[in-house]
Amino acid sequence: GAGVSQSPSNKVTEKGKDVELRCDPISGHTALYWYRQSLGQGLEFLIYFQGNSAPDKSGLPSDRFSAERTGGSVSTLTIQRTQQEDSAVYLCASSPGLGGADTQYFGPGTRLTVL
Amino acid sequence: GEDVEQSLFLSVREGDSSVINCTYTDSSSTYLYWYKQEPGAGLQLLTYIFSNMDMKQDQRLTVLLNKKDKHLSLRIADTQTGDSAIYFCAERNFNTDKLIFGTGTRLQVFP
């Protein structure tokens, strides 16, 4: 079946512009996660959704970052007034949300470059 | 706090075994995972282990968990050039659902 998809795959923007990144989770997965992978770094947790609510926003690096999820499916991550340090690969993952191992399946990521 | 550490590089000859190590600090970890990331690709789940297990085997992969020392390892038998990638370990805390990742180990397999 279809995996997690993300769009766009690449985004180049100018400093100060807003960007929206989209994630389509695996159908039926109630949990959705956003992570960020900066060059040479590991993965940094940003935010987690269970259904449409976000019980854990602890990883959002500043108030320029926000995310929403509608209909328990698609999620968008918005970065306002982008800065060069926002350049990274943004990864989305989804999981069934049923407990147990609840393994997370990752999308291919969106590579964001802020000039 | 939560911290997961891995060595950055490992180089092995094709056909040998590879052992990638990981240490973590969170004693409340419930599950520990290994992911593989090939160049330009997303993360692929390889395997996971529940924290009350000490070993799990899946074809060429063997995961060993020493909960006392908070040490996790991934052994790849008969390593192939297609195994060249970055390998991330991750732990999941009992109280949260997010994964805490290590920095990744770059495995290079040479002929």
Image: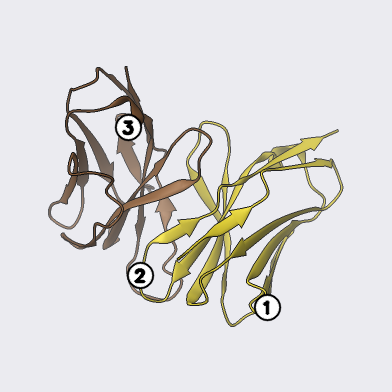
| Chain depicted in brown | A
Between residue A45 and residue B107, name the one nearer to us: A45
- At label 2, the amino acid type is Thr
**Chain of residue at mark 3:** A
Q: Quadrant of residue A15?
A: top left
- Is residue A1 in view from this perspective? no
- At label 3, the amino acid type is Asp
**Residue depicted at 41% across the width and 76% down the height:** B94
Q: CA distance from mark 1 to mark 2?
A: 22 Å
What number is the disc on residue B73? none
- At label 1, the amino acid type is Asp
Residue reaching furthest front? B1
Between residue B47 and residue A60, name the one nearer to us: A60
Residue B42 in percent (x, y) is at: 47, 41
**Residue depicted at 26% across the width and 63% down the height:** A30
**Chain of residue at mark 2:** B
Provide the residue designation for mark 2. B96
